[in-house]
Amino acid sequence: MYQLDPALVRRAREDFILRGESVADWARSNGFNLQMVYRILSGKSKAMRGQSHHIAVKLGIKPISEGSKREE
């Protein structure tokens, strides 16, 4: 079963603190659903497809896939 790397998720959360940026501001500026971003950062979402996948890629939690490259 696929699962996001907990170390990468933790690092993404820490990056917000280091940048002094709120999760809400980041979600808004990138056009993402705030609750979905929180679900990924809390480990409740596997971010397998759709917007959750794009959020995880943008956060650096998942690598950019060929499918993601084509959709941009």
Image (tube, grey):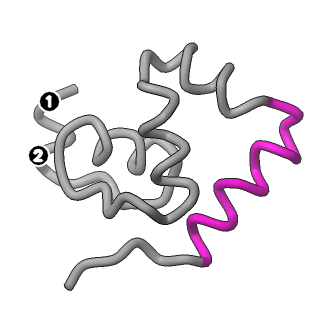
Structural distance between the alpha carbons of marks 2 and 1: 6 Å
The local secondary structure at tag 1 comes to helix
Quadrant in the picture for the N terminus: bottom left
**Position of residue 33 in the picture relative to residue 10 (left or right):** left
Q: From the viewer's perspective, is residue 63 above or below residue 57?
A: below
Camera-nearest residue between 56 and 69:
56
**Position of residue 30 in the picture relative to residue 7 (left or right):** left
Which residue type carries mark 1? Answer: Glu
Which residue type carries mark 2? Answer: Gly
The local secondary structure at tag 2 comes to helix
Q: From the viewer's perspective, is residue 7 above or below residue 27?
A: below
Q: Quadrant of residue 21?
A: top right
Residues shaded magenta: 7-21
Residues marked 2 and 1 touching at CB (< 8 Å): yes
Quadrant in the picture for the C terminus: top left
Residue that badge 1 annotates: 71
Camera-nearest residue between 51 and 65:
51
Q: Residue 46, image x and y in percent?
A: 32, 63
Q: From the viewer's perspective, is residue 31 above or below residue 12?
A: above
